[in-house]
Image (cartoon, rainbow, N blue to C red):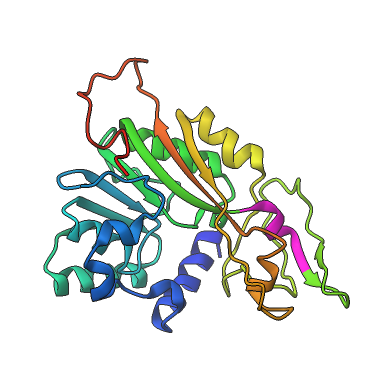
Amino acid sequence: MTFQDRNRAAWNHLADTGSQFAKVATDEELRDPLRTLDTRGWLPHSVKGLNVLCLAGGGGWQSILYAVAGANVTVVDLSPQMLALDRREAERRRVSVRIVATSMDDLSPLDEASFDLIHQPVSTCYVPDIGRVYREIARVAKDNAVYISQHKQPTSLQVVRRDQRDHYVIGVEYYCEGKPLPPTADTSYREDGTVEYLHRWDQIVGELCRSGFVIEDLREPYRGDPNAPPGHFRHRGRYIPPYVRMKARRVPRTGVSSQPESRLWTPDR
């Protein structure tokens, strides 16, 4: 069984069992969909008419928010069950969403230079070669397209357990070069049944730049809670940041953009 097969099965199970990662957009969230999607000011005031790719974003949340906001939405995911939630919610909310079942590192069903905005939640940890993912995104992105992504930080994936003094122990090699992560006692930021891979900083950031993007902003979301007890994932989040978010822009292929200046390129908020 390949890593794609195992991850597909794992995410199908998470969708079927009501995982927190398979919670569809609520009425409250849909009242201001762009605010729900973006609290950092990375999106424009309007995405109406823009071609948006929700990459590895199945689950009936991200795609529905963008569609309700007026975007032309394509959602790509490996899991048919996660995509079934997008299909169901699109019908229920009476919006149009294009649904494509494929891996994030194979976007061959999508046309070159066809998206204004690509939004990818935490997911690159499920493929061994993050550079291949970035190159596929670069191919389908228009010149000056914005790519918003979130990734698991490598140090977080190196943690294997908590010791008797409530210290978090690093036990996974940093230079593991495409090897699946081993099972660990600490599963705070691991999804059950999935095959995950650690990507180094020079791969998360460097490969993105080498694929034709420039990084415009980078944030580390805080997931700690001073009141969380040892062993709770929010206790660990006080000491080890689990995620990194990045906003990047596709460099024009010719070096000079042939597109007119758009409201997307400079955030208004």
Q: Position of residue 87 (x, y in %)?
A: 22, 69
Give the image quarter of residue 137. top left
Residue found at x 26% / y 61%: 33
Q: Is residue 166 left or right of residue 44?
A: right
Residue 105 sits above or below residue 260 on the image:
below
Regarding residue 244, the answer to whether it shows in the image is: yes
Q: Which residues are magenta?
A: 153-160
Give the image quarter of residue 242. bottom right
Q: Position of residue 21 (x, y in %)?
A: 44, 72
Q: Is residue 97 left or right of residue 239?
A: left
> Which part of the image, by quadrant, shows the C terminus?
top left
Q: Is residue 30 left or right of residue 248?
A: left
Residue 19 sits above or below residue 239 on the image:
below
Query: As rendered, which of 222 and 200 lies closer to the eye?
Result: 222
Residue found at x 28% / y 56%: 34
**Main secondary-structure element of the magenta-colored stretch:** helix
Residue 33 sits above or below residue 81 on the image:
above
Q: Position of residue 238 (x, y in %)?
A: 68, 65
Q: Is residue 24 left or right of residue 163?
A: left
Q: Position of residue 266 (x, y in %)?
A: 31, 34
Q: Is residue 110 shown in magenta?
A: no
> Which part of the image, by quadrant, shows the N terminus?
bottom right
Residue 131 sits above or below residue 96 on the image:
above
Residue found at x 25% / y 53%: 74
